[in-house]
Image (cartoon, helix red, strand yellow):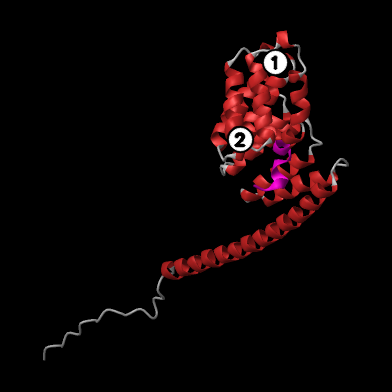
Amino acid sequence: MKIGRIVYILGIISILAVIAIPAMAANETQRDNATDYYNLGVLSLSSNDSTNAITYFDEALASNTTMIRESDALLYTYQGKSFAQIQLGLYSAAIETINQGLAIYPADVNLLNNKGYAFYKLGDYQDAVTAYDQALAIDSTQNRTWVNKGDALYQMGDYQGAIAAYTMALGNTSSNQGESTDATIKLAKAQKAAATAGSALMIFGVIVVIIVAGGAIVYYIKRTPVNQETAEKPVKEVKKKKK
């Protein structure tokens, strides 16, 4: 899995300790099954146990989610479960989980970016671009999202679109060194591909013109009437005079 494309997915790991603390610190009388399963899911993710993480998050979602919804732990449950599914290569399942989360949190940029990544891994680049566009409509300063969108457009052969996306990533002042380097390298690659595609298109156009012109010449030759002066004349019968 390429690190550059999954910053938002990996970002979940960096906040696991933080998001687990509020639930664990809750009063014992207020704790419920959803909270317990949620915390177990977080701990499983922190130890790279994606399979058990999915199981625990499913148990949390199957429980009364009132309390974890109040603390935003419900959102993190959908993020964590989809992250674990992506880690296991379960991209279609991850998209299903993300859609469930988006039904409750439609403006969550992390879910949208993870959705775009899952579609990208499935080879569904158009839907990946759509998900990234939705994320950018909420926050256009997400440089990694611009790069991810550029990657999807590049795979679609839309090199000009990819160039525009990488350029946007470089133009944002919030871009870090790693993102800038990645975007710069990919921008150069897209520009080279665009130039090559342009040359190939020009050559193809020239070939088409030659073929059309040749066809027109052949058609003209076949349709031109034969010169009557050079055409074969019929034999005139000569009758002999009787003596």
Q: Residue at x 62, y 49 (%)?
A: 155
Q: Is residue 6 magenta?
A: yes
Closest to the camera, between mark 2 and mark 1, is 2
Q: Tell me if mark 1 has few (under 14), some (14-19) or many (20+) residues whose alpha carbon lies within 10 angstroms of its own.
A: some
Residue positioned most to the front? 28
In front here: 172 or 90? 90
Q: Residue at x 41, y 76 (%)?
A: 227
Vertically, is 38 above or below 145? above
Q: Quadrant of the C terminus?
A: bottom left
Q: Is residue 119 magenta?
A: no
Q: Is residue 214 left or right of residue 110?
A: left
Q: Which quarter of the figure has residue 225?
A: bottom left
Q: Which mark is drawn over residue 99?
A: none
Looking at numbered disc 2 in the image, what kind of residue is underneath it? Ser
Looking at numbered disc 1 in the image, what kind of residue is underneath it? Arg
Vertically, is 127 above or below 58? below
Rendering coords of residue 163 (x, y %): 74, 50
Distance, label 2 to label 1, CA atoms, is 22 Å
Rendering coords of residue 83 (x, y %): 64, 34
Dot 1 corresponds to which residue? Answer: 69
Could you say whether the residue bearing mark 1 is in a helix, strand or loop?
A: helix
Could you say whether the residue bearing mark 2 is in a helix, strand or loop?
A: helix
In front here: 176 or 143? 176
Q: Tell me if mark 2 has few (under 14), some (14-19) or many (20+) residues whose alpha carbon lies within 10 angstroms of its own.
A: many
Disc on the earlier residue, 2 or 1: 2
Residue span colored magenta: 1-10
Q: Main secondary structure of the magenta part?
A: helix
Q: Residue at x 58, y 39 (%)?
A: 88
Dot 2 corresponds to which residue? Answer: 50
Q: Which quarter of the figure has residue 226?
A: bottom left
